[in-house]
Amino acid sequence: MKIYEIGTGYTPIPAQVAAATESVVEELTKSYIGMDQPVEIIDISAPKRAKHNLPITEVSVPSFFTKEDVSLGIVHKIKRVVYSVALAYKLKRILKNENEKAVLHFHNQYNLFFFLKLVPKKLRAKALVAYTNHNGMWSKNWNDVKDLLYKRYFQEIFSMKNADQVFVLNEETRKNVIEQLGIEAERVIKISNGVNTDIYCPISQSEIEETKKKYKINGKKVILQVGSVYENKGQARAVEMLSPLLKKHDELIYAYVGGIVSQEYSETVRKTAESLGVSDKVVYLGTAVPGTEMNRLYNIADITFFASEYEGFPLVCIESVSAGVPVVICSDINIDLGPGCIVTSKEKTESDIEKKVFSCYDEYKKLCLSARENAENNYSWQKIARKYLTAFIEGEN
C-alpha cells in the first residue's frame, strides 16, 4: 500500500509561508518515511521550492500560477481550479500504473471534487480515497452556517459524500457531517492535527533575547498571536480584550505575526488600538517562515493568544504548547488542548491571564513545563501519522 499525500496547490511544499495544510502534508509524509511506509507527495510545480529531501511529484501549471499566493481573491480561486484539473489527470496516470491499491489522501475540496468528476469510477476504485476536512466552518452551529455551507462549500459536501473515508479535526465537525449530510459514522474519523516537537521546542534565554532584539522589543513581556490577518483570526478582538492588561503592565506588549489577507482589516486592528489608547503596545511583526524562525517567535512570548471565530484544529496553539509557551484560548470554539492551555472568555480574559501568568512565576513555569510534556506525549506527528495509517489499513480491509 502506497500513500499519496495530495498538496493543495495553495503554496508549495515544504511550506514557506504559514500555510497550515501544507505543513500537515509535509509532516505526515516525514512521519510515514520514518515508519518505512511508502509515500509520495503530489504537489504544484514550483520553480523556487525550498530545499528538501521529500519524495515529491510535481503537477505542471502555467508559470503565472506558481507565484506565491496568500490572498483569497479571484486569482486564488482560478489557480485552485487550474491546479485541480491538472492534478486529476496526473492522478489518473498514476492509478493506471498502480498494481496494488493505493491511498489518495486529499486535503482540499477543489482537488477532490475535480478528481471525482474527471477520473472514471472504475479507475478510482484502484485507490482508497480519503479526505481530511480542515474547514473550521463545519465546527460551528449547523443552523448558523448551513446556508453558507451549501452555497459556498457544495464541492466539499460532494467530496465528503463520495470519499471512502472522511477525517475531521474535532467532534463538532464529525457530528455535523454525520447528522446533517447523512454520511455513515464509520466513514467519519476524528484525528487531530499534530506538531513537530523537534522543531517547535524551547530555546535558550540568549536566543530569546537575540530574537527580541532583532524585532526591537527587548525588555518587553509579550502576548503573541499567530495567524493570517483577517476577521476570523480576530486580531482586533484580541486588542480589545487585552487592552486592560496592556495598560496595567508597562513592559507588556501585544505582538501579532502573519500574512495580511485583508488590508482593510489590518487597518481595523490599527484603529482599534488607537481608539483604546494602546497603539504603542500593539506591534505587527510581519510574516515568518514555518519551522525554526516561527519557533523563535513563539519562544519570545510569555503566552500566545487565540481568538479565532472558527477553526478545525489550530496548529498555532499546539505549536506554542510544544515550544513550552502556554496558549490562552478565548474563542467560541470548544477546544481544550490539555495542560498548557488556558481556556477563558471575553469577560475573564484579564483576570485569568493575571492569575495564571503574571501573579506567580513558579506556577507559570510549571505551566510551561506541562505544556511541553503535553505536546510530546499526545500530539507528536509520529502519533498522529500512526492513527492515519491504522485507519487506512482498516479502510482497505
Image (tube, rainbow, N blue to C red):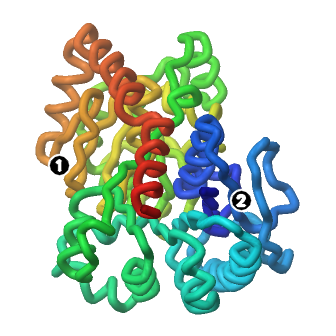
Quadrant position of residue 140: bottom left
Which residue does the numbered mark 2 point to in the structure image? 12
**Residue at position x 30%, y 71% from top?**
138
**Residue at position x 50%, y 19% from top?**
202
Asked whether the viewer can see residue 252, the reply is no
Residue nearer the viewer, 56 or 19: 56
- In the rendered image, the vertical position of residue 91 relative to residue 104, given as above or below: below
Residue nearer the viewer, 143 or 52: 52
Q: Which amino acid, mark 1?
A: Lys
Residue nearer the viewer, 135 or 174: 174
Q: Which of marks 2 and 1 precedes in the sequence?
A: 2
Quarter the N terminus occupies = bottom right
**Residue at position x 46%, y 42% from top?**
386
Residue nearer the viewer, 378 or 151: 378
Marking on residue 215: none
- Location of residue 262 in the rendering, given as x and y in whole percent from the top left corner: 52, 68
Say what secondary structure mark 1 lies in.
Answer: loop
Q: Is residue 281 left or right of residue 15?
A: left
Asked whether the viewer can see residue 366, the reply is yes
Which residue does the numbered mark 1 point to in the structure image? 346
Say what secondary structure mark 2 lies in.
Answer: loop
Around disc 2, counting alpha carbons within 10 Å, would you say few (fewer than 14), some (14 to 19), or many (20 or more)?
A: many
